Image (cartoon, grey):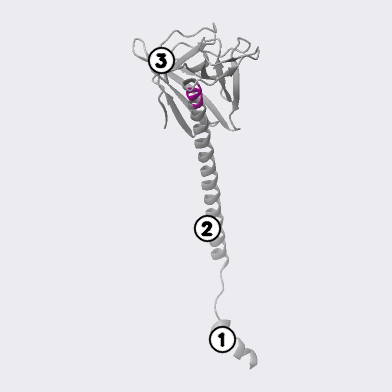
Amino acid sequence: MIIDRIFPKRFCNKRGFTLPELMLVLFIVTLMSALSFSGSKDFTRNTELTNLTYDVALSIKTAQSYSINVKGAVKPDSTITFDTGYGIHIENDSSYLLFADVASDKRYIAGSGDVLVATYNTPPNYKINFCAFYNQGGPKQDCLPPNGNGNGNIRDLEIVFNRPDPDASIRLVKESSGNFTGVTYNSVDIYIKTLDGTNSRTITVRPSGQISIK
């Protein structure tokens, strides 16, 4: 017969896929798709975290560069001063400021004469924390948020560079009094984290002005 010539029996008699086999294939395809999506999501999150970390480190480096290179700052009275340091001010976990320390008090206070150069906001799903380290009767830390191992509640972190040296002034402000802690810090670690805390990068700033990322 003609149909036998077109579809020989060796093809017509071949067994097809069974339902369990189809379900197994579907399961494998679904699993591979889920793993691929999860890996892509983790890669994107890690890339965003790394970029944010380098952005914060670059802002600190910019403050240092402005101080060393004597960048002029326009004061509230529209005059320009070249005799000023620059710094980074962190007072919450979602933003930080680059400022000119016109008041020369190594901290940023709105309305005190200091010049706000730029405000940086962290993207959604990321936050900034920090711990400053010192030795006083043993290694201690002053942190935001507090960890119970130092001076108690901390409000602000101030990293200020004063010309002509690249050295960093690392100072923290107490929540209770609004005054500096009065401690000389050996270094400060700035933690860039995802909101759930599962991923983080660290920027370390030392009094020598060295800035490193890990």
Label 3 sits on residue: 185
Residue 204, image quadrant: top left
Q: Which residue is mark 2?
A: 28
Q: Residues within 10 Å of mark 1 (few under 14, many from 20)?
A: few
State the CA–CA distance, disc 2 to disc 3: 55 Å
* Mark 3 Cα shell of 10 Å, populated few (<14), some (14-19), many (≥20): some
Distance from Cα at disc 1 to Cα at disc 3: 86 Å
Q: In this orientation, does residue 91 appear?
A: no
Residue under pointer 1: 9
| Residue 181 spot, x, y in % from top left | 47, 9
Q: Position of residue 25 (x, y in %)?
A: 54, 62
Above or below, 17 against 198 in this view is below
- Examine the residues drawn in magenta and state their main secondary structure: helix
Q: Amino acid at mark 1?
A: Lys
Q: Nearer the viewer, mark 1 or mark 3?
A: 3
> Residue 107, can we see it?
yes
| Amino acid at the residue labelled 3 | Tyr
| Discs 1, 3 touching: Cβ within 8 Å | no
Which label's residue is closer to the chain start, 2 or 3? 2
**Residue in front for this viewpoint, 129 or 182:** 182
For image coordinates 54% across by 79% down, the residue present is 14
Question: Which residue shows up at 55% across the image and 64% down it?
Answer: 20
Q: Which residues are magenta?
A: 62-66
Q: Residue at 52%, 27% (x, y): give it.
A: 59
Where does the C terminus fall, quadrant-wise? top left
Which circle marks residue 21 in the picture? none
Furthest-left residue in view?
A: 138
Q: Amino acid at mark 2?
A: Ile
